[in-house]
Amino acid sequence: MTYSHPHLLGIEPLAPPEITAILDLADQYADLNRRDVKHADALAGLTQINMFFENSTRTQASFELAGKRLGADVMSMAMQASSIKKGETLIDTALTLNAMHPDLLVVRHPHSGAVDLLSEKVNCAVLNAGDGRHEHPTQALLDALTIRRAKGRLHRLSIAICGDIAHSRVARSNIMLLGKMENRVRLIGPPTLMPSGIEHFGVEVFNNMEEGLKDVDVVMMLRLQRERMDGGFIPSEREYYHRYGLDAEKLSHAKEDAIVMHPGPMNRGVEIDGELADDINRSVIQEQVEMGVAVRMAAMDLLARNLRARRQAKPEVAV
Ligand code: NCD
């Protein structure tokens, strides 16, 4: 089985073999990305438009590089300067761009569900680069690839996701992906930063780092997402770091060979100790960034194959 969907909107609809198909192809692109000449032609002739309605550094840069390395014509819209500021709706902007015949649309938006809605209005492949607190599928896939390469497998691992779970689309997508691949997921954080309905997630919840980290294989830290908080979720950053910030002492409760992850951007001294984040024997944060490009290449390649197949089957409908 390979990837069968027209879009990549979330991890939720994916079957485990589809996740594996993306990761296997991404492994090949990771090799390509380490060569001097990094070009392939999987997207040659296709147009990729990136629409980021929220700030982004690594996600936007890696989608742009991924498209360029695969030969697409890539355009990144400066959404701050776009007609959205003049009152145009998301859907009108999408329809306008759609009339220019893009093949791949990469969208990040502050509202949960906005990217799904947009995908119904356009006739190209849509990739969700993060929508509100909902999903961030390529982040979960790049995390999965990083784990698989570091641990040699992506099943029967014990993985702790720590910190601001409630506001995190990274956590949501990871919980789903890691659960589908039959891992044990623990969530660790203060009760105020746990999402409601947590009991339906199939995870174990801890409010104490030392207990939650006991014997885990992977420690995934999250940023305190202040832009999504509208009140006092934590007493102070100092207190938060003391209780939930990852440092060498807290990490010593995990397995000896446990790896440390963070999706970035990091707040050193708030959720993670700066030295630990830079410790190449424990931290795989730079590998996550590297795998980000490879995973986005793989996802766009697979979506483009499906797009071409649909167009061939129904040439009269420009889907
Ligand atoms: C994450 C995001 O935007 O959701 N960052 C990312 O994509 N690398 C996490 C975050 O912003 O904290």
Image: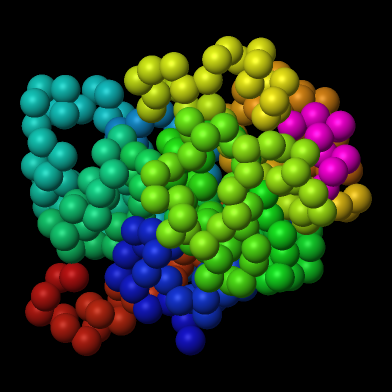
| Residue 186 seen by the camera | yes
- Compared with 86, 191 (above or below) is below
Q: Is residue 260 found left or right of 16 in the rendered image? A: right
Instruction: Report the residue at 62% width, 38% height from top.
Output: 207
Asked whether 173 or 104 is in front, the reply is 173
Residue 49 placement (x, y as % from top left): 31, 47
- Compared with 23, 39 (above or below) is above
Q: Is residue 49 found left or right of 92 in the rendered image? A: right
Q: State the extent of the magenta-drawn residues as a range.
A: 246-254
Residue 268 placement (x, y as % from top left): 69, 21
Instruction: Report the residue at 15% width, 39% height from top.
Output: 90
Q: Quadrant of the C terminus?
A: bottom left
Q: Please tell me whether residue 247 belongs to the stretch shown in magenta.
A: yes
Image coloring type:
rainbow
Residue 210 placement (x, y as % from top left): 77, 39
Asked whether 132 or 76 is in front, the reply is 132
Q: Please tell me whether residue 179 belongs to the stretch shown in magenta.
A: no
Residue 40 quadrant: bottom right
